[in-house]
Amino acid sequence: MNGTALVREPASTLADGIVTHISRSPVDVALARVQHAGYVGALAASDWTVEQAPIADDCPDSVFVEDGVVVCEDLAVLARSGAPARRAEVAGVAQAVGSLGLRSARIEEPGVLDGGDVLQVGRTVYVGRGGRTNGEAIRQLRGLLAPLGRTVIAVPLSNVLHLKSAVTALPDGTFLMMPGLVPAELFPAVRPVTEEGGCHVVPLGGDRVLIAASAPLTAELLDDIGFTPVVVEIGEFEKLEGCVTCLSVLVPGR
């Protein structure tokens, strides 16, 4: 097994989730649950042991479990969202990471941080500075991760919810990026993409890379450069600015 994939079932209130940078459209919760099951199945098929955080029906956005925690080696840094309505989600995430035997720390007031703003590539940690994450949280995260040998680089965001809404990394160390949303010069090797869903990928181990069905051209690119795209349909979550990254937290085996 590669490790543990932490996920969380969609809340019955999912359709009330926060929308910031796109127009709101109706969300089919029943279909979202089917899509989530397919997503979880793709993780399991890629040799990840699936662990469910407690469902939180009073937290519409709780399915986006990545925003609640940043896991680096054996340390789980519990987030404090820049969206106050989302802070109640963290209690269940804390319970789940505790059951995995991780030690924990917290982002403290006045710091605010969403896990979706944190992109870890090797020993470098890129952190988006935008509407959900502030400079104080970046300072705190830098202090927490320095003992683990990590370098934290702040990345200014514009017109995008999270850093990983604009850029993610492939297993070869290159970055898939939607142009114009983050400064490309902060990243060492960039592959621009034309599909919004194409800049959101999750390396699953080996040559397997999770990607949304909304990005067929990028999936074709991945295949062309020697990766195996694992395609999942997450259209109902995309209506809430969700993507493949934010529906899980991957904890590699130790």
Image: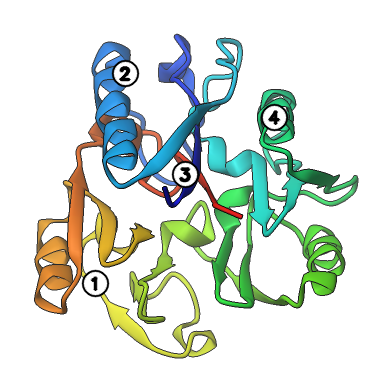
Colouring of the image: rainbow
Instruction: Report the residue marked by disc 4.
Output: 99
**Left or right of residue 43: residue 34:** left
Foreground tag (1 vs 2): 2
Residue type at the position of mark 1 = Val
Instruction: Report the residue marked by disc 3.
Output: 246
Instruction: Report the residue marked by disc 2.
Output: 33
Q: Specify few, some or many for label 4: CA neighbours under 10 Å numbering under 14, 14-19, or 20 or more.
A: few
- Seen at 50% across and 81% down, the residue is 183
**Left or right of residue 187: residue 101:** right
- Whole-angstrom CA distance, mark 2 to mark 4, is 24 Å
Q: Specify few, some or many for label 2: CA neighbours under 10 Å numbering under 14, 14-19, or 20 or more.
A: some
- Whole-angstrom CA distance, mark 1 to mark 3, is 19 Å
Vertical side of 223 occupied by 43: above or below: above
- Whole-angstrom CA distance, mark 4 to mark 3, is 20 Å
Residue type at the position of mark 4 = Ser
- Whole-angstrom CA distance, mark 1 to mark 2, is 29 Å
Instruction: Report the residue marked by disc 1.
Output: 193
**Left or right of residue 122: residue 154:** right
User: Which tag, 3 or 2, sits closer to the chain's start?
Assistant: 2
